[in-house]
Amino acid sequence: MDLESLTRTSGEWLRATGPESDIVMSSRIRLARNLAQYPFPARADDATRAEIEELLHGLIEQRPGGKRFNYIPVSTLEPLDRQMLVERQLISREHSETQGRRGVGISDEENVSLMVNEEDHLRMQVLHSGFALDECWAEIDRIDDAIEAEVTYAFSERLGYLTACPTNCGTGIRVSVLLHLPALVATKEIQKVFQALQKIGLAVRGLYGEGSQAMGDFYQISNQMTLGKSEVQLIKTIQDVVPNILGYERRVRTALVKENRQGLHDQVSRAYGILQNAQTISSEETMHLLSSVRMGINIGLIDDLQIPLVNELFVHTQPAHLQKIRHAKLESAERNIARAAYIRQRLAERHVDRN
Amino acid sequence: MKKCGRCSKPAVLHITELRQGEVQALHLCESCAKEYLSQSPEEQESVPAGASADAEPDLDEIDHQDCPNCGISFKEFRAGGRLGCPHDYTVFEDELLPLLENIHGETEHCGKVPKRAPDSSHRQFKLIKLRTDLRAAVEDERYEEAARIRDEIQAITTNDPVGEPREV
Ligand SMILES: [Zn+2]
Ligand SMILES: [Zn+2]
């Protein structure tokens, strides 16, 4: 796979084609698996890590689940390339930053990635646009079956799939949805959502930001427990709760429009205007303004811009992408200038397309 | 099939012992049997099979018990938060169960099961140690031993795709 070409494309999951994709940016399921005959990656010596990588790389080349994968030996990549894969959500931050032989198989549509020698021997992840957890599960289950036909997974009847960290054992599953909740954030109602979710054992974390402070009003909701409930039960817990959050966000949006349509229209138009004209812009401000514009499109206050382009800008304006697009290492101040130029160009192209 | 008295995996070793005038039957899975047999009689005495519920786990004892396959100690695990190999779930079971209960609120898996017999997974944990031993034997030019280890590895890897439990 040519990493350079990634800067000209975007993952299928950003195309806003899935159900409820005005609020649900993406659905994701990941499975943690280990081979029975090896120590976990962090305790494996170089020769063993290499052996594990060779074995799993071989299986990934055999198109598990009928999918074609491009294998990238992550340990041989430059830090900037690794960071770009993190920004695209194809590998975890840990996989980018850890040491030793490791890699990732990425499907052509960029919606499946199979990480080798992460914290566990194999971390499989499927991403879909919108609220589509059943599709994610069907796909990852099929790939898991195909790989399991060739290897012996570390498994115990009592504790299920055995993982390097006891927080993942059992099903080894992490089910998550990425939600765009600007209205709940603006009215601080989001706190109530946090409390309700924590009570039923779900974790909430901000995307891109550190801790609970989310940049761009994106929040990821995921299961914490992995042992004692089946994959389907864990998926259902999230499937049951997400419609309530979507309903809540939509009600608050409607109320905001009703209360002060002009004020809101002004706010999203100004955000759009800044993005079209700024000469230098930080990552934080970009996220904040893109979030306003994204909501503006969804409530019909901006009508000459499409959601997929906004989704793509969230990813392509991050540091590693900008530097790959510019083919240069850029300091923070230079990045802000490059970011503003890139956004102006993409938004201007958008208007040319329409005429 | 009888279950292992220590970890509830299928038992492959059945021992009847006379101890302090009492007849005691032991049923152990392969990994627990290996551990049991490698202990001195005193140790066997002090850590009775079936992990008596009333005995307070002695922290020093726990910290000194290392995984025979990957060498990690429970202390190391507690410091780093990551286990060394899948077999650690058996070796440190008594210490891990309360932890798992804390994290998940449950200690019994429910959900997907590999189509391959899960028992074969348990047996393959042995390969972790055998591979390390083999590399060491070759490095030290102990070729006879290396050949023996290689045979042992081969026996496991050729038998296991079928995954039929072997009775000892
Ligand atoms: Zn046992
Ligand atoms: Zn171990």
Image: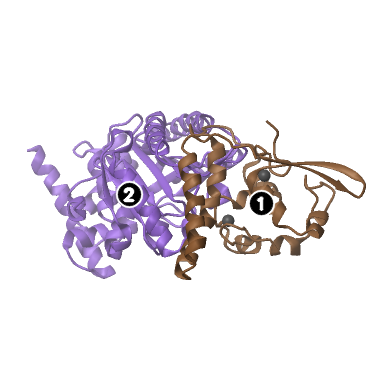
Q: Chain of mark 2?
A: A
Return the x and y of residue B34 as percentages of the image width and height. 66, 51
Q: For numbered disc 2, what is the local secondary structure?
A: helix
Chain letter tied to purple: A
Residue at 46% of width from left, 37% of height from top?
B161
Question: Which residue is farthest left?
Answer: A355
Chain letter tied to brown: B
Location of residue B73 (image quadrant): bottom right
Which residue is denoted by mark 2 in the rendering? A57
Q: Badge 1 local density, few (<14 within 10 Å), some, or many (20+)? A: few
Return the x and y of residue A256 as percentages of the image width and height. 40, 37
Which residue is denoted by mark 1 in the rendering? B34
Apparent side of residue A73 relative to residue A222 in the rendered image (left or right): left
Location of residue A305 (image quadrant): top left
Return the x and y of residue B101 as percentages of the image width and height. 67, 44
Image quadrant where one finds the C terminus of chain A: top left
